[in-house]
Every structure is written in C-alpha cells, then in structure tokens.
Amino acid sequence: MKRKKSNLFLIPKYSELNFFSNTIILLFLFINDEFFRNFIIFGVLNTRDPRVFIIFLFFVAGMIVSIYNFFVVRKKNSFEKFLLAFYILFSNFFLLFYFFFKC
C-alpha cells in the first residue's frame, strides 16, 4: 500500500551533512566545555548500570557511522539506519537536558 503524500510532511528528512554537523558540534562541546565533559564523564561513564553503558555504546557507534557515511557515499543497510536514527534521537534529547541543567 502506498503512503499518501499529505502524511509525509511530518517525517523529518536528514542528510549526511545534518548527522556530521551534529557529531562535530558534540565533539567541540566535549573538547571546549568543561561542564559538558564532566557531565558525560560522571553522568554516563561512572554509572554501574549496564543499560546506560549499552546506550552509550550505540550512541558512539552512531557517531562513528555518521562520520563514515559523510565521507563514503553508499547505500546504508537497516542496522546503520537504526544507529543513525538512535544517534540523532538521543543526541537531541541529551543536548536538551544538558542545556536545561546548565542554564
């Protein structure tokens, strides 16, 4: 069954440049902002919950895939699409909470 064109405007479309720029912004924040660095080190890496560590691994894998796909043009498989969707969702969610707690 084919989707209607009217429902497609609610679904965002991301290019490789969006993923890459999001990754660069997060890396610059980690390098330059001491509060952000401490927020990640003490909030994520010092936890003993394995679920947080698994989410962090998927997040880092999404960052790596976004950098790789920016430089290599090829068709993505379903797992890479999942990693990129997971990465963009959690990076935006994470930055929302970061700026909420910082301000």
Image (cartoon, rainbow, N blue to C red):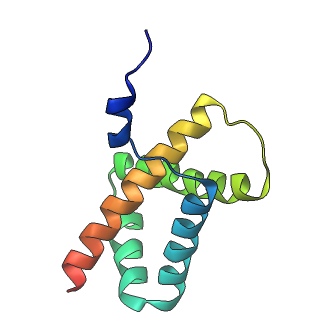
Give residue 55's position: percent from left, percent from top: 42, 49
Q: Residue at x 48, y 47 (%)?
A: 13
Give residue 26's position: percent from left, percent from top: 49, 73
Instruction: Specify the quadrant that holds the C terminus.
Output: bottom left
Q: Residue at x 20, y 76 (%)?
A: 100
Q: Residue at x 41, y 74 (%)?
A: 41
- Residue 40 in sight in this render: yes
- Residue 47 in sight in this render: no
Closest to the observer: 19 or 12?
Answer: 12
Position of residue 41 in the picture relative to residue 64 (left or right): left
Q: Could you tell me how many numbered marks the image carries?
A: 0
Q: Residue furthest top?
A: 1
Residue 26 position (above or below residue 7):
below
Q: Based on the displayed image, in which of its 4 quarters is residue 45 positioned? A: bottom left
Q: Residue at x 54, y 61 (%)?
A: 18
Closest to the observer: 56 or 2?
Answer: 2
Position of residue 102 in the picture relative to residue 76 (left or right): left
Give residue 74's position: percent from left, percent from top: 77, 41
Residue 80 position (above or below residue 33):
above
Instruction: Specify the quadrant that holds the N terminus.
Output: top left
Give residue 34's position: percent from left, percent from top: 41, 90
